[in-house]
Amino acid sequence: MTLIARFALMILLLVSPLLMAEPVPEFSKIDSLEEGWEPLNFPDIESHTRYELMTLDGKQVVKAETADSASGMITMIRVDPAERPILRWRWKVSNVYEKGNARRKNGDDYPARIYVAFEFEPEKAGFFERMKRKAVEALFDAQLPGNALNYIWASRLEAGTMAVNPFSDKTMMVAVDSGSDQTGEWVTVERNVLEDYREAFGEEPPTIVGIGIMSDSDNTGESATAWYGDIQLLPAP
């Protein structure tokens, strides 16, 4: 199973079947990462990214340290993207990867990424995809989400570019920052997930069922530190 598929599966294995309706838990307002967030560790990857709450520049944020490692933090929500289409967050990274390449499997690592998972729509899937999903769901007793958007700090992919994930055509990579020009600086990002989903998949998006952060380096073998500020899903202005 690919890293993206495992990420999507573990989201649903680690949370209650009753999904929360409130917005994304904000890092600046919680006392522990256990308040609304769950660690995402992959059983076949021994080295995990380290996540911790810390105060930096007067704000409580999450620090992620990755070195030839991969893991994430996840939270489950249930949000209609038509009602809350604006995804806003801020982040900072120490560096990008020399071997990072969003179009290749061996370069599919990012010092920082935001993962947005959408509900699976079986009526739009082909027969073989439905059968494959049923087999996986029966094995793990969990329902897999559908399409996903990955907002990434890319090494080479030009900012504003969308690319199909090299492991899965159900995940679109969106380069919102790229290269080293702004490394070491806080960058605020705002995206319209409704518009991004339409552009990425050519249709209206279903319900958002999960938000994740992940700093990984297991494919490139490199290392980086990232800092994540609050992640918000907001109504359109």
Image (cartoon, rainbow, N blue to C red):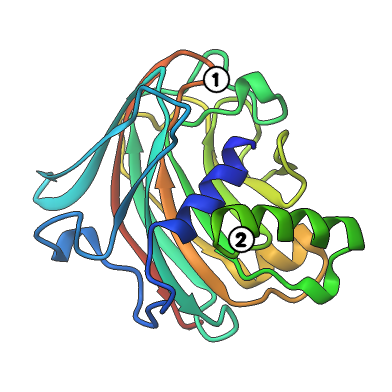
Camera-near label (1 vs 2) is 2
Q: Is residue 118 visible?
A: yes
Q: Earlier in the sequence, mark 1 or mark 2?
A: 2
Res 36 → quadrant = bottom left
Q: At which x and y percent is residue 87?
A: 47, 66
Q: Residue at x 9, y 50 (%)?
A: 58
Q: Secondary structure at mark 2?
A: loop
The structure residue drawn at horizontal position 17% and vertical position 60%, both measured from the top left corner, is 28
105 or 43, which is in the foreground?
Answer: 43
Please state the horizontal and vertical placement of residue 106, each as a whole percent of the image.
64, 19
Where is 148 relative to 157, above or below?
below
Dividing the image into 4 quarters, which one contains the N terminus? top right
Left or right side of 226 for 144: right
Can residue 175 be seen at all in this image of the molecule? no
Q: Position of residue 82 (x, y in %)?
A: 60, 83
Q: Amino acid at mark 1?
A: Asn
Kindly give the residue lying farthest to the front in the view shown.
139
Left or right: 230 with respect to 8?
left
Horizontal side of 214 relative to 5 (left or right) equals left
Mark 1 to mark 2: distance in Å?
A: 24 Å
Q: Specify few, some or many for label 2: CA neighbours under 10 Å numbering under 14, 14-19, or 20 or more.
A: many
| 53 shown above or below 191 | above
Q: Which residue is mark 1?
A: 219
Q: Which residue is mark 2?
A: 144
